[in-house]
Image (cartoon, coloured by chain):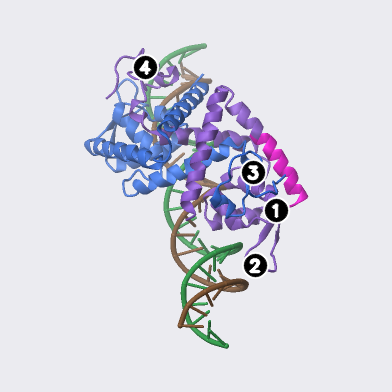
Chain colours: A blue, B purple, C green, D brown
Amino acid sequence: MTTDTPPSSASGVRPSESLKSLGIEDLDCLEDLLSFYVRSVNYALSVDLDARLESLEVARGTGKITALLLIDSHPGIRPSAIAQATLRDRPSISRIVSHMLKNGLVEKVESPNERRASGLYITDAGHELAATVRDIVKQQSKDFFADVPKEDRDELLRITKSIYKKIIEARTP
Amino acid sequence: MTTDTPPSSASGVRPSESLKSLGIEDLDCLEDLLSFYVRSVNYALSVDLDARLESLEVARGTGKITALLLIDSHPGIRPSAIAQATLRDRPSISRIVSHMLKNGLVEKVESPNERRASGLYITDAGHELAATVRDIVKQQSKDFFADVPKEDRDELLRITKSIYKKIIEARTP
DNA sequence: AAACAACTGTTGCGAATCGCAACCATTGTA
DNA sequence: TACAATGGTTGCGATTCGCAACAGTTGTTT
């Protein structure tokens, strides 16, 4: 199962020097594990992003940023729409929105037509924060992927976006 | 900020019909948010994978699967090496390994040379589980990305793997 | 030899996330 | 009027994760 010849793995790809120093000669056992790499990159990306947003009231949240930006660019959007866009359930978004309401980032307005639903609107403070977050995120993308060729970055964006849209479509019959 | 012409967005890509039905005409506000798409894909991927592993003692864990496969293919590997490969800290792996020990999936052997470190070895049950997990993961990759062109899948694997290796190298100076 | 730093693994603690189930209010329909 | 469907909220439980702290081991420095 394990290649016993350290210098070069069976796949012909030089194993990372750092991993070798860990006693891990190759990652052949994970070679097919696309999910492993996606998860790892996602993890590192999230940690890095959280660090940059640390004191900004939207840190540590996968959904908080998306909610903020969506409300900012889609005045009157409803919580359930955000839930579907972020692939989360309504309670999760409800808590995020509550948090934002408490911090004065958004406002909730119920329309006379649909009194069960609530339209969300950004406040000045929220709009300002959204702009800041947008800048940080763009900068992070630049920094984090600094060593990744631009074509690869574009490819990654294109592919993940297309997968995301497929997921959304599969979820809304 | 928001394009008001539904049929086609400024980017030339048709907005998803499903998102439109949510009142989200476009995702321009997220266009640069590579992290958003990576996170979303990661999330959907993890949920789907967890569902397939539900009753297999390695479910719900990002690190469990990797730990199992690494121990299976690298006899004698140490917990700290797994920690570095999975980008997690030692306590996290310690708990995962404890869980595996309790379930008889691995064994811990301390070498006479390095009595502070512990070498991990797979058991028969663990080896069997590893084989099962490998099959499931491969199948999942096939199913989950069924609608994604093969070139894109290969590209995604290549790019995320290269990013992963860069991260590892940056972490071990 | 003794003191010290570096490393490994473990446990405690606390924070945060997330999904499911259940609940109330509203809307539209039978 | 009764009933299903939808939207939002709260409670509960399970899980994950990181940091701090600790004990044991190894090697180096003094």
On screen, residue A134 above or below A3: above
Q: Do dots 2 and 3 share one subunit?
A: no
Q: Which stretch is magenta?
A: B122-137
Q: Which amino acid, mark 3?
A: Ser
Horizontal and vertical percent position of residue A29: 65, 42
Which residue was labeled with disc 3?
Answer: A9
**Label 2 sits on residue:** B114
Disc nearest the viewer among 4 and 3: 3
The residue shown at (37%, 45%) is: A59
Residue type pointed to by label 4: Gly
> In whole angstroms, how far apart are the C-alphas of marks 2 and 4?
61 Å
Total labels: the figure holds 4
Q: Chain of mark 1?
A: B
The kind of secondary structure element at disc 3 is: loop
Quick one: label 2 or label 4, which is nearer the N terminus? 4
The chain letter for the residue carrying disc 2 is B
- Give the label on residue B12, or none: 4
Residue B135 is one of the magenta-drawn residues: yes
Q: Tell me the CA gap for discs 1 and 2.
A: 16 Å
Q: CA distance from mark 3 to mark 1?
A: 17 Å
Instruction: Tell me the chain of label 4.
Output: B
